[in-house]
Amino acid sequence: MFINGKRADSRDGKTIDVLNSATQEFLDTVPAATSEDVQEAIDASQTGKRVWASTPVHERSRILMACADEIDRRREELAVSLSTEMGKIIREARGEIRVCAQIFRGFAEMANHYYGRTLTDYQIGTEKDIIFTRREPLGVVACISPFNYPVELCTQKTASALAAGNAVIIKPATENPLTIMKIVEICHSCGIPGPVLQLVTGRGAVVGDLLVGSKDIDAVSFTGSTEVGQHIAKVGAETLKRVFLELGGNDPYIVFEDCDLEQAAADAVQGRVQNAGQTCCAPKRFIVQSTVKKEFLRIMLQKLEKLRQGSPLDEKTDLGSVISPKAAQEIQQQVERTVSQGAELVCGGKAYDLSYFQPTILDHVTLDMDIATTMEVFGPVLPIIEFDDEEQAVAIANATIYGLQGGVMTRNMNRAIRVASKLACGGVVINSSGNYRHLDQPFGGWKMSGLGREGVSVTLDEMTQEKSYILKNILAG
Ligand code: NAP
């Protein structure tokens, strides 16, 4: 761990093994923090927040830019580490490290030009006053991140919080904390002071609860499951801290009969198998017009058969492993449950070689099945639901507790925009699946998919608070 500028073991010496996702070989251990360890980090962060808030923004930005350069310089080493501990194919791992550096740069640039406001004197009696506002740091932000994009998603929180002048305590996902730990080391070597950026490892239920419950933590930025997000919102309410939640999804991908079916099927497969299906905004329900369903399914099947599954580190692999054998088994159970509820298994359906899962198509999925409404599958599984007309397509798309993103395929742009405007979610991609995230985009969910928006153009609003400075009678003659 990194506590108060030093590498730290847990006080009781307990550790957690980190394994290679694909092979289950031992990689390393990380400490299982005790409550005293977490408290030490919280105490140090109180110094960290004062140090960093009084560091000028040009200096904070310069350091964040230096971090970005160093991450870029070490991209290959970081990508191999990420691929190994995650099961993510190496080409995608390189992309994630590249994006991580871009996020550091984006927030460093944004912070330099992030301004407050000056009010007008429209209210009678305030003509001689000047009121301006400044965006000031919140204090200490706990950044709790998931396993699926362990570097990118942790960086979205950490770089924004730091750019805004906050101290940060990271709690990474326990299954793959190693690459983000290397990035924290890089940040320290580039000049971010130890008490300003700390990282504590250990089980979420222990470390996470202590951070979220502490009165000395001012905000929690969380990405992960809806279930844990709800728990964090409840615990955070005790101290009325700000809680930003980026949660699960069960995103619709609507395919109309007039679209380019070849492209629609290619994007369906690409969107669903990226990161072995473990992407929050992946298309997870394929809502296809009945007139073209058979043909769409045929093309998808062809494309799935061509996917090369194998070692994540092999440059030729298209589909790596999921995070663990347990996760692969869970996906198999979800598929079996859907079949028992009446769906037809067209291909795949089985976990194999420890952490791998076969690409799977489920046909004849209907709204009374969990997979169509409440159940999020985090694996390469493509459930197909048929529709006859536009109204029905929208109703099926919205019949879920989630609302992250969505995708619409049609050549009729009128219809595309009309449907997009009716989808209850945070973002809609027209001409592809919803598996899309521009770094500046205000990314986030409706309904049970979260609270708040994350992205270079918006997160500084969440990571700061606005203070009014009132210069009373300052213009009086
Ligand atoms: P998760 O099980 O909710 O875990 C996320 C993080 O929360 C981990 O660091 C975990 O620690 C920690 N945690 C667990 N219990 C906690 C508690 N009681 N208090 C505080 N923290 C706690 O999620 P996951 O399985 O890693 O990630 C997959 C989920 O994330 C999916 O639902 C996916 O859709 C969602 N996701 C959403 C977005 C988005 O932007 N909307 C992006 C990516 C993923 P441990 O690892 O120690 O359990």
Image (cartoon, grey):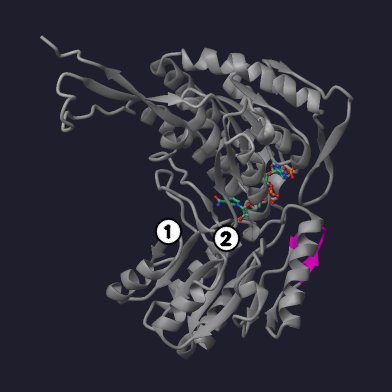
Query: Relative to residue 447, is residue 116 drawn left or right?
Result: left
Answer few, some or many: residues within 10 Å of disc 1's Cα (few below 14, many 20 plus, some between 14 and 19).
Answer: many
In the rendered image, residue 273, in percent from the top left (x then y), is placed at 60, 62
Name the residue beneath numbered marker 1. 427
Name the residue beneath numbered marker 2. 249
Above or below residue 341? Residue 91 is above
Report the label total: 2
Query: Relative to residue 364, is residue 206 drawn left or right?
Result: right
Query: Which mark, by number, is residue 254?
Result: none
* Residue 352 drawn in magenta: yes
Q: Give the residues in magenta.
A: 350-356
In the rendered image, residue 45, in percent from the top left (x then y), is placed at 62, 19
In the rendered image, residue 466, in percent from the top left (x then y), is placed at 39, 29
Above or below residue 52? Residue 31 is below
The answer to whether residue 213 is seen in the rendering is yes
Are the residues tagged 2 and 1 within 8 Å (C-beta)? no
**In the displayed image of the protein, which residue is found farthest to the left?**
477
First in residue order: circle 2 vs circle 1: 2
Q: Residue at x 49, y 73 (%)?
A: 397
Q: CA distance from mark 2 to mark 1?
A: 12 Å
Inspect the image, locate mark 1, and give the three-letter code of the amino acid beneath it.
Answer: Gly
- On whether ligand 1 comes within 8 Å of the CB at mark 2, the answer is yes
Kind of element beneath mark 2: loop
Kind of element beneath mark 1: strand
Inspect the image, locate mark 2, and give the three-letter code of the amino acid beneath it.
Answer: Gly
Judging depth in this view, the residue of 311 and 229 nearest the camera is 229
Q: Quadrant of the C terminus?
A: top left
Q: Residue at x 48, y 22 (%)?
A: 165
To which quarter of the image does residue 388 belong? bottom left
Answer few, some or many: residues within 10 Å of disc 2's Cα (few below 14, many 20 plus, some between 14 and 19).
Answer: many
Q: Quadrant of the N terminus?
A: top right
In the rendered image, residue 19, in percent from the top left (x then y), is placed at 80, 43
